[in-house]
């Protein structure tokens, strides 16, 4: 069966060639975002910065999540994912941009993080106790080091992967298999730190030891959705002919389904512990999010981020149906955007969410930047890791 | 085989194969020839065999879904009844209907009901445990593959007309030989008891 097929059937789809129109749209998106940010800073700086950190964290997570996905494939020696792994690798092309947006965040620290105001911290016992950790200099340095490490590992591992395309050398896979565990341990620590610093410290009194995992659940949620969307897009264009079959889509669908449940599990666990203990300094976080119009957003997260994708992805047929899969993946991307808005905005706008031209313009801008970085990567490298030793086996991927 | 077995009713014709690939091809031929009932026996799962047999999807997932929803609902209702109806107690200043505290149990019962029902339904759908038939041949659990074209059960009238190919011992044996079976023989019912 699998032996009857020869390697000659593997056709290298080559690099991705975006139409000039598509690239133009992304550039207009990015320009629109920059213009919105400038106008927002002039008119409503708090909103502009809140939206900036929201989208910065969303796309930074997506970028490093792409390397996380690839790293678990290398560490487990996964076969099924060989034809789609390069797409998740491409997200890391945005990491240098995330480093830049983090540096830009420096100018918004005073608008976003109350712990950066010496007069606010003075006399507040909790904040005084945390002032050693939550200080502007240390905040910037440790997060820049983390992002620098991510860029380093991405360069190294993705470099190995793309170099393998030409030589088909197994050694590159072995190198990445050795690097991956080191990266994964480092990722767990640094991403938790980035979540605590950039998101959780928006309310410096509040703490949740699960917050890092909560952000990670969202990270993997959008990484899987984006990888699935890109796979479906290229498959529709006919570029993955003979490389990606329904079984690969089924696996992506199962992965999305599993991490929908994982999100609900982590999100609920964080809520349950705080709700049960009912300690004022912990409960405040959820009180803000259950009052005013925020209660509707909280209810949306239960329904939209968990129940809707859960039941849509439950049947086998929907995981093998490109239309359903694409629809759910797009919905998941929006749901996580709303989730991060729910993390950021209640610290500034107690009465309810604000989605207007600033938020939409900024989001469009970040989509443009992310799209440009990823498109540039994929127009330089093959969209499929054609030299991967697992590829041939994976192409004839069959389910038990 | 003694003469005693020969008096037992014929249950079908069995053909043995040495290769899983040959079995899949033969299975396709038997299915295309529209034999009324046949089954394949292998020592381990063989890729593509379900498709060759033309098996439909199992209804098992629906059992799991219904059992899971039942477990979840029962867990909620029981906790609601104990905490808010039958013996209401104020715990930690929280309302009687403190549903967040019940979610872990709702989850557990969802999994428990779904899991146990799935196992039970799997046994039922597969007709297990099988106490009516002995294994046809010990090699089927080791290194050989077999295809059995089954005779209509006793009392069940063979309907040769229409869609199905009428079962006849000689015809079925020849068909299996032509499909590539190495050894072909008739099977007689051998009860466990």
Image: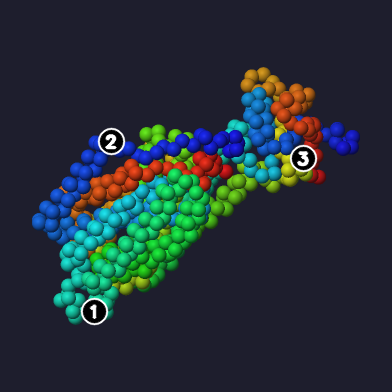
Task: Measure the alpha-carbon separation of dots 3 and 1.
Answer: 80 Å
- Mark whose residue sits in front, 2 or 3: 2
In the image, B134 versus A231, the foreground residue is A231
Marking on residue A19: 2
Q: Residue at x 64, y 43 (%)?
A: B45
| Discs 2 and 1 lie in a common subunit | yes
Task: Measure the alpha-carbon separation of dots 2 and 1.
Answer: 55 Å
* Residue A101 in view (yes/no): yes
Image quadrant holding the N terminus of chain A, namely: top right
Q: Secondary structure at mark 2?
A: loop
A196 to A219, vertically: above or below? below
* Residue A336 in view (yes/no): no
Q: Position of residue A142 (x, y in %)?
A: 30, 68
Q: Position of residue B182 (x, y in %)?
A: 76, 32
User: Tag 3, which chain?
Assistant: B
Residue designated by label 3: B136
Q: Residue at x 71, y 22 (%)?
A: B166
Q: Secondary structure at mark 3?
A: loop
């Amino acid at each position: 069966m699998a032996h009857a097929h020869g390697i000659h059937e593997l056709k290298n789809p080559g690099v991705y060639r975006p139409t000039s129109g598509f690239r133009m749209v992304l550039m207009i998106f990015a320009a629109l975002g920059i213009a919105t940010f400038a106008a927002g800073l002039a008119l409503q700086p708090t909103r502009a910065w809140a939206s900036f950190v929201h989208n910065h964290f969303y796309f930074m997570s997506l970028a490093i999540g792409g390397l996380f996905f690839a790293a678990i494939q290398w560490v487990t020696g996964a076969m099924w994912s060989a034809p789609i792994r390069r797409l998740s690798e491409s997200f890391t092309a945005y990491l240098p941009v995330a480093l830049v947006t983090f540096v830009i965040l420096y100018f918004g620290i005073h608008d976003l993080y109350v712990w950066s105001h010496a007069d606010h911290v003075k006399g507040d016992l909790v904040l005084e106790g945390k002032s050693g950790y939550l200080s502007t200099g240390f905040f910037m340095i440790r997060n820049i080091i983390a992002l620098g490490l991510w860029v380093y590992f991405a360069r190294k591992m993705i470099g190995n992967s793309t170099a393998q395309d030409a030589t088909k050398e197994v050694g590159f896979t072995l190198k990445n298999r050795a690097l991956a565990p080191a990266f994964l341990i480092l990722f767990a620590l640094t991403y938790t730190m980035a979540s605590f610093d950039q998101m959780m410290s928006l309310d410096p009194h509040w703490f949740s030891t699960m917050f890092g995992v909560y952000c990670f659940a969202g990270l993997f949620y959008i990484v899987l959705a984006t990888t699935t969307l890109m796979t479906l897009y290229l498959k529709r264009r006919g570029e993955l002919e003979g490389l990606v079959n329904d079984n690969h889509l089924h696996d992506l669908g199962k992965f999305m389904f599993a991490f929908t449940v994982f999100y609900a599990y982590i999100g609920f666990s964080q809520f349950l512990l705080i709700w049960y203990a009912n300690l004022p300094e912990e409960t405040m976080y959820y009180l803000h999010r259950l009052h005013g119009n925020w209660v509707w957003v909280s209810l949306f997260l239960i329904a939209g981020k968990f129940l809707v994708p859960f039941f849509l992805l439950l049947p086998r047929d929907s995981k093998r149906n490109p239309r359903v899969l694409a629809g759910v993946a797009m919905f998941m991307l929006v749901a996580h955007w709303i989730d991060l808005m729910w993390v950021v905005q209640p610290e500034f706008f107690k009465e309810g969410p604000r989605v207007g031209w600033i938020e939409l313009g900024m989001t469009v801008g970040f989509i443009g930047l992310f799209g440009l970085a990823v498109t540039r990567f994929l127009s330089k490298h093959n969209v499929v890791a054609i030299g991967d030793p697992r590829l041939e086996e994976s192409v004839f991927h069959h389910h038990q | 085989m003694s003469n005693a077995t020969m008096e037992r009713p014929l249950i079908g014709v069995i053909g043995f194969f040495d290769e899983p690939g040959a079995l899949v091809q033969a299975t396709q031929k038997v299915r295309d020839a529209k034999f009324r009932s046949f089954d394949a026996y292998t020592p381990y799962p063989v890729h593509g065999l379900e498709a060759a047999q033309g098996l439909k999807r199992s209804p098992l997932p629906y059992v799991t879904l219904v059992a899971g929803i039942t477990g979840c609902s029962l867990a909620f209702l029981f906790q609601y009844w104990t905490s808010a109806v039958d013996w209401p107690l104020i715990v930690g200043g929280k309302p009687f209907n403190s549903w967040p505290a019940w979610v872990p149990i709702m989850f557990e019962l969802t999994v428990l009901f779904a899991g146990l029902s799935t196992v039970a339904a799997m046994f039922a759908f597969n007709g297990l445990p099988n106490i009516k038939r002995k294994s046809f041949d010990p090699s089927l659990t080791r290194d050989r593959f077999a295809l059995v074209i089954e005779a209509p059960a006793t009392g069940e009238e063979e309907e040769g007309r229409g869609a199905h190919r009428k079962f006849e011992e000689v015809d079925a044996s020849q068909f299996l030989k032509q499909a590539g079976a190495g050894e072909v023989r008739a099977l007689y019912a051998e009860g466990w008891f």
